[in-house]
Image (tube, coloured by chain):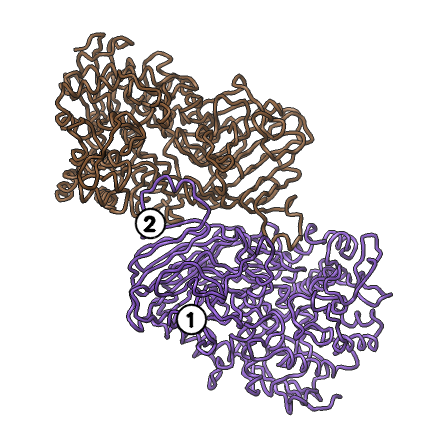
Chain colours: A brown, B purple
């Protein structure tokens, strides 16, 4: 750990930019924790494997055998409106619309031991405690709250693989720490497959929990150390009866017995505390073994100084946030750095300090090169690619270049390990959960390969892309390959799939072009035209088509649940040809008609029925019929750049930035979706956005900051200046790149990475 | 594998003794498969990790929520009286009274696919098939049966870690191989914790099954290869609903999809076969990973020649059986070599070919020395020590010396890995199931240490023995240590425990004496006297005592379920002071009275109620009130050696040998108990038996063979000759050891291991 600390120290000092202003003051983990954002307020380091955060309720997945709609609200375990906390668990998704995790809830209590969490209405019937936001602090890698029922001050911080708890107790002869392995997020019946807890000695606990959740087969191993020996301990085992155990009552298996296993297990540890005494817990996780978890713990947190760990974590955040320094007002800074914070949470590290990780083949793999001790790459999980290929990965490819390359390497390992031999769709903890559609890993790979951002073998990557795109039994692909579209009578959401496959195929073609593999290029560039096959000229919309070639009868262009579409209606989805906007515009009747279509999107009045049926967003997430709270339209405001009303990109982007992002608990208009919403904010604020990742181009919009300095990993600096910008001065008059007027609507990845200056001259009048 | 084969070849040829007669012809795996023996007829190599054997029914653990008494009959999966076979699974216990295992049932079928096994009454409703014993062959490492319903000839053989199946099909367009991971032995609700199956390609399947059985947390990984590619495949998943899987119907997850997971999974593979076409399957297991299972498979069975594998396996059995060559009639040879066969099945290898194994700490351990590639020891599991410390391990210490030392090393690893830091009680697949009483691992260790049979660190072994014997929270030990006995009001089976602890403590004292640790000796030799504390002079029996010092009121000396006793009544258990028979005799009133007590044991008439209440044995397993079908009295016939009627040891032993062992399916009078019953037969047939393992002495009885030649691993030969012995000539007139008259009732381990001749002169008159 001396080495690790030294490394951080050197690393931070090596940075070539000043750190005069503390930026973590602007990053607000609490943003998005109210209602739809599905973020969490707890502690994590950038891309950390551990996300240690409070849970404000235990929501059963089913009530009376039916799905409990409330469970959706608790994707991240915390809802700002709640009044009680049930404990602090170690793993969370940031901003997802389904969920999982919530592993190993820890709760400190005093008085009579209670192992039932109780209910929000009657917290006195369980171990949960009331709390207030007044006594709550949420900062990057630091969370603090007063547990009112017990007068315990809870503080949390983390390293990449270790959660560090500090509980300040009152004087008590009956102080307890509860380790609840029953709790989980999206905790449906039989989600807990197996749990094993082992008391190694009077301060060290190890074990694991295996769950069948969004990740079908997932095991989290842990090692947990107390700063002070417990006096006694025990378990509550509410698993179904274990037949044999009853026969041999050689021990009291539930009290001071060093191991327990089953599906529904809670453990507790008893202490005596003095007034103000701190009990600290270090809790490390691993996907491989308890031995690895313990090694993670000992390597990352050798000591007991909570503040040291917290300061290190916050220093890392400072370093990451400083990668983009902006001049802007306080609210913009809060929005911007909160977005940076949320963009740098997912994907998450999925590898132990010794380089080992669990693969999709359920084998232990090592990321360490045979000849050396340094990992050849860092393995990541939590790839919500339908969301994040759009803006998060293109952002990371600029500002977290090496990490983005490792994420691609992780996708290639996923491909190698998976039984289906496909790139990830939605990768969660060495599992593929098949959530959403497309094969958008190819977009992330294209965005790297085309730009030459390589730390992986691009030809092997292309092979993986091709194998994935030709996996006939996947989600209508056999029909798509035969007919040129997915027929709705064979496979649902057929329009959305056809459009997204066409874009993905274009990405593959771009990789093939770059790698000089013309046959592959020809095949996939042809496939990339398939969007044409679901365009219905008679209605002017993309429309579901049947296997006999006819369009499906009956068609509601506003209905989000309309057959043929997923997470977006026909009005929005008809604009999804990110790789060929010119062709789309031609197909839809030319620039004028297309502009009208776009205009109407942003201005129309939707019927109330729309909101009843639309998932993942609130009325706040809508501008007209434009749904920013969901992803399919994230590029849409930039499409004006291909019309004669480019200025509408500029004012629409600014409108979205202003309306859809607020630095408050309810400030996110929809799920943050593992950073995609936040990445949209960051890039759009800087004045550019990747309409078609894989093109190498970022379409220009309207910068919302006065100045931004991008500190790149290659040592270069790219500076954006928006002269005279303001709430009204949203229109771009001219753009100067490195001293020369820029006569196009985009800049390239290479121009950014080479460093330089991009100066926007802003005005309240559009050109 | 070339190397492995070469090794076997050299190994067998290196043997210094002739192999003129094939001994496997006398070893009958079918013995004990009817009723109470609980052996299985299938294929295994000595101490093999795989025991590949037919299952004749699928017995639910519960019927209408109540324990199903029939489940007990199926401890080994097969009952001779059954008319149908449901398939062949890869793991079995030999002769146990509770059970587990039965992993991965394979069944070949033709015609319409059926994935339900059907019932014995209506086999047509499922995949099970009728069979007859006329079309069945069971030899060491070879099993053959005709599956009448399908006209499929099934043949099985194994290597240590691989089951090799050969199915000869009729012509069929609908041939199937079913892989049933739902089936299991003692298959109570929720026993199957998780199953994962992965189709790697059209001949290779991998996966694992995790169960919560007699082993609480046990995972068996497998790799399975077909000799011929299947045409298609699919699954039946009757697990409880997996919530997420329904959302994303990207595939037909049950047909030609390469992976499946859940709790209740069956897979099937479809073929077309020609008349007489053989489909072969190699199925390897591992406790560590599917990669290790595959390595086991490729190393042990590189080719597809069924007969080669069978011949190798049978050659290994020949080698093992030839370690004791006897001159005797055919029935005696059948009994003897069947006993040798059963004695050399358990404990079982629990380590992969690369030296890795799963420990009780659920970590992967390596038995390979850091500096080398040869394992420093072979790890074993399946320690039924309450049974096997009596005669099986003392037998192995003579004739499988190196293996027995490795078994002790395995126990020490168990001690190191276990959360309780105790030596094994009943070790099953990296789990402690706490079955039965005592800490008899110390007996096995003492038997090795006292004799100087060491390949482990004896001082560390003694430390482990002490820690185990002082584990206060274990099964009444804290009271035992305080009061000198286990009080029945605090902990049940108190007399049995007190007596067995006292013997175990004497074993520890013997180790301490040998290692010159006098303080330990003094402490434990004192504890070894504790049997006195449960002797009730007023009744003349060992009797349960209360914590206030009084004897428990009410006392039935014949009742097996009497409080204070387990698996034996007071009449039998009162004789359990194996380490101090002289003192026991004194305590019970002297030799004459004691002889009368022994006589009455063998001659009394038991009431019918006795049989209703006595577990694990039939009326056939009883001689008078002497229960040979269970273990606590296994030393009792030899106790006459401490009286003035030593000749009664001789005729009683011969009577037991004759009445209790027959070379027929129902030939075992009780559970073989992992070889303990068989080891009793072998040693008693040779003319000696270890009344007190740890003494270094084997008490002399009456040899039932004309001659026996023991080929020892140290290269020495020990020959036993019983001149003039016969059914009536059971009495020993004199004994000559290496040319000198032996004037005592025992020989020592060292005398045997040094080689030599032991000549008994037999007569029909006792001295």
In the rendered structure, find residue A636 and report the number of the disc placed on it.
Answer: none
Residue B276 spot, x, y in % from top left: 31, 73
Residue B466 appearing in the image: yes
Q: Chain of mark 1?
A: B
Determine which residue is flagged by label 2: A419
Relative to B232, say whether A467 is above or below: above
Residue under the image location 20 percent in, 20 percent down: A597
Q: Residues within 10 Å of mark 1 (few under 14, many from 20)?
A: many
* SS under mark 1: strand
User: Is there one chain holding both mark 2 and mark 1?
Assistant: no
Badge 2: chain ID: A
In this rendering, would B233 be left or right of A762?
right
What residue sits right under mark 1 in the picture?
A: B157
Q: Quadrant of the C terminus of chain B?
A: bottom right
Question: Left of A95 or right of it: where is A710?
Answer: left
**Residue A212: % across, % down:** 45, 43
């Amino acid at each position: 750990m001396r080495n690790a600390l030294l490394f951080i120290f050197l690393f931070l000092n090596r940075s070539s930019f000043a750190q005069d202003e503390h930026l973590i003051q602007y990053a607000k983990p609490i943003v998005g924790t109210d209602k739809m954002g599905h973020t969490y307020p707890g502690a994590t380091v950038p891309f950390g494997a551990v996300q240690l955060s409070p849970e404000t309720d235990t929501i059963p997945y089913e009530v009376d055998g039916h799905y409990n709609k409330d469970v959706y609200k608790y994707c991240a375990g915390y809802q700002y409106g709640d009044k009680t906390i049930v404990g602090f668990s170690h793993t969370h998704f940031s901003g997802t619309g389904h969920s999982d995790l919530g592993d190993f809830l820890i709760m400190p209590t005093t008085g009579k031991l209670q192992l039932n969490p109780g209910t929000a209405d009657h917290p006195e019937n369980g171990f949960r405690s009331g709390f207030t936001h007044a006594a709550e602090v949420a900062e990057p890698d630091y969370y603090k709250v007063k547990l009112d029922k017990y007068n315990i001050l809870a503080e949390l911080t983390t390293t990449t693989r270790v959660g560090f708890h500090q509980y300040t107790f009152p004087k008590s002869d009956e102080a307890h720490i509860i380790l609840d392995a029953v709790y989980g997020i999206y905790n449906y019946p039989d989600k807990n497959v197996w749990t094993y807890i082992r008391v190694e000695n009077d301060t060290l606990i190890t074990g694991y929990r295996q769950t069948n959740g969004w990740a079908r087969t997932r095991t989290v191993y842990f090692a947990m150390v107390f700063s002070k020996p417990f006096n006694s301990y025990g378990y509550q085992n509410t698993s179904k009866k274990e037949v044999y155990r009853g026969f041999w009552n050689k021990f009291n298996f539930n009290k001071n017995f060093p191991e327990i296993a089953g599906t529904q297990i809670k453990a507790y540890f008893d202490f005596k505390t003095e007034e103000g005494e701190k009990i600290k817990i270090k809790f490390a996780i691993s996907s491989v073994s308890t031995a690895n978890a313990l090694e993670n713990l000992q390597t990352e947190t050798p000591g007991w100084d909570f503040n040291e760990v917290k300061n290190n974590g916050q220093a890392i955040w400072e370093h990451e946030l400083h990668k983009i320094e902006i001049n802007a007002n306080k609210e913009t800074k809060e929005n911007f750095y909160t977005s940076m914070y949320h963009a740098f949470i997912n994907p998450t590290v999925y590898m132990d300090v010794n380089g080992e990780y669990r693969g999709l083949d359920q084998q232990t793999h090592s990321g360490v090169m045979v000849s050396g001790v340094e990992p050849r790459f860092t393995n990541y999980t939590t790839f919500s690619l339908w969301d994040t290929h759009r803006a998060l990965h293109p952002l990371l490819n600029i500002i977290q270049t090496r990490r983005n390359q490792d994420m691609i390497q992780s996708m290639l390992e996923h491909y190698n390990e998976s039984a289906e031999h496909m790139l990830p769709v939605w990768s969660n903890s060495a599992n593929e959960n098949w959530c959403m559609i497309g094969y958008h890993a190819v977009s992330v790979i294209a965005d790297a390969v085309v730009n030459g951002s390589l730390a992986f073998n691009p030809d092997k990557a292309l092979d993986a892309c091709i194998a994935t795109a030709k996996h006939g039994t996947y989600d209508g692909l056999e029909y798509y390959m035969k007919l040129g579209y997915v027929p709705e009578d064979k496979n649902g959401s057929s329009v959305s799939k056809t459009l997204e496959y066409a874009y993905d195929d274009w990405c593959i073609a771009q990789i093939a072009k770059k790698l000089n593999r013309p046959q592959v290029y020809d095949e996939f560039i042809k496939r990339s035209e398939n969007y044409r096959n679901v365009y219905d000229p008679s209605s002017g919309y993309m429309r579901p088509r049947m296997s006999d070639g006819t369009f499906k009868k009956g068609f509601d262009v506003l209905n989000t649940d309309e057959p043929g579409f997923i997470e977006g209606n026909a009005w929005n989805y008809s604009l999804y040809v990110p790789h060929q906007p010119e062709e789309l515009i031609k197909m839809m009747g030319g620039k004028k008609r297309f502009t009208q279509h776009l205009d109407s999107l942003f201005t129309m009045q939707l019927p109330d029925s729309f909101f009843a049926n639309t998932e993942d967003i609130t009325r706040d997430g809508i501008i007209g019929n434009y749904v920013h709270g969901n992803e399919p339209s994230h590029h849409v405001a930039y499409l004006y750049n291909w019309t004669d009303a480019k200025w509408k990109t500029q004012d629409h982007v600014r409108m979205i930035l202003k309306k859809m992002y607020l630095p408050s608990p309810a400030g996110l208009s929809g799920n943050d979706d593992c950073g995609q919403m936040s990445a949209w904010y960051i890039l759009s604020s800087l004045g550019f956005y990747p309409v078609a990742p894989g093109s190498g181009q970022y379409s220009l919009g309207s910068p919302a900051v006065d100045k931004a300095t991008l500190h790149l990993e290659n040592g270069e600096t790219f500076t954006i200046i928006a002269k005279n910008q303001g709430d009204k001065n949203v229109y771009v008059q001219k753009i100067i790149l490195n001293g020369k007027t820029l006569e196009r609507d985009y800049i390239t990845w290479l121009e950014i990475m080479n460093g330089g200056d991009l100066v926007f001259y802003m005005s309240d009048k559009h050109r």
